[in-house]
Image (cartoon, grey):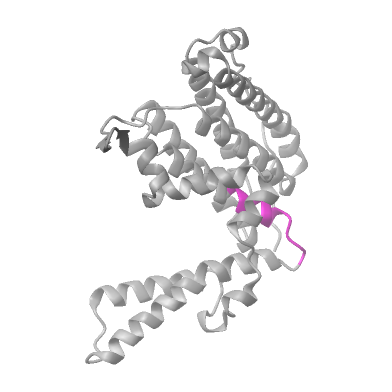
Amino acid sequence: MPETYLSVAGPLGDMFEPRWAELQDATDENPFIYAGVELLKSAVVLAHGLADAPREGPLPINAAIRCGLMVRAGKLCLDLLADVCDGQGRQQIGLLRQLTETLANVAYLCRDDEQGTRHRAYLYDSLISEREFLKVIERRRASGDGTELLIEGRLRRSIEDTAGAAGIDLDTIPGRRQIGWPSAQDRIEQAFGATAYPSYRVGSDALHGGWFDLIRNHLNQVDGGFEPEFRPIGQRPQALLAAAIQLSMVALVFQQHQPPQMQRLFGEHLAAVLGRAHRVDDMHEHWLASDAGSS
């Protein structure tokens, strides 16, 4: 059943315009951080508006998946903003990794065929691990006295309810190789280009505590060995600008499934945020390569 939307009022307010002269003459990263915060805030407002478009009734499953992913992306961006503005920037890399894959999923699903093949593969890939977990519970019960632990009962019911909401019988899910869900690298490169995946991989190290994360953020190399580094990682503009760029890019793809009035209302604003975020990011890269950025 296709989703049916109601009319949307407008227009939207003006989007944030960076202080270009201040960025050009920057002596530290603070102007870039400020621009990244404001551009990401603008992108979040627009993405929220698209996801919350007035409609006559509930969303069908495929549209609900795309909408839910956009809602998740917006929440991750708010977490990133809170980490930078109210925290010490410890979670920037890990949050950006989650955001990148979430938005890559949206972009991939928005280009599905009429049969919904990609959406079905998304659901199968999401639920196959849950099915395997149920098998772990069954094996434990079979090796014991057959009694189901209370926590196992709660988990089993939760998994069954989740599959039921998607209209999927867990026993009918094919093997992982037959599902057809592409790798994270393929999805991310399709959405954002080949340069996005290395940053995603760095995020994996930050999440799992790999050596790259340790030596960059939690250890100092000194003569004869290492010393612990307890200072916070600190706020940086890169994650903010990447998030603003990725969210704006995918929101422009997502809006193609929205009614024409929504596309007219949001498209120009999203394109403006995307262009400004790209420009600030380019200026920051040049600043890093300059004497001011390398000092």
Q: How many marks?
A: 0
> x, y percentage for residue 269?
68, 28
Magenta-colored span = 103-114
Q: Is residue 83 above or below residue 189?
A: above
Residue drawn where x is 40% and y is 49% of the image: 207
Magenta region includes residue 265: no
**In front here: 6 or 217?**
217
Q: Is residue 143 visible?
A: yes
**In front here: 76 or 101?**
101
Q: Is residue 57 visible?
A: no
**In front here: 227 or 130?**
227
Q: Residue extending furthest front? A: 224
Q: Is residue 191 above or below residue 126?
A: above
> x, y percentage for residue 95?
45, 43
Left or right, residue 293 beside residue 113: left
Left or right, residue 30 beside residue 264: left
> x, y percentage for residue 33?
49, 22
Residue drawn where x is 23% and y is 90% of the image: 144
User: In which quarter of the view is residue 281 placed?
Assistant: top right
Residue drawn where x is 74% and y is 68% of the image: 115
**In front here: 209 or 68?**
209
Residue drawn where x is 57% and y is 79% of the image: 173
Q: Is residue 115 above or below residue 209?
A: below
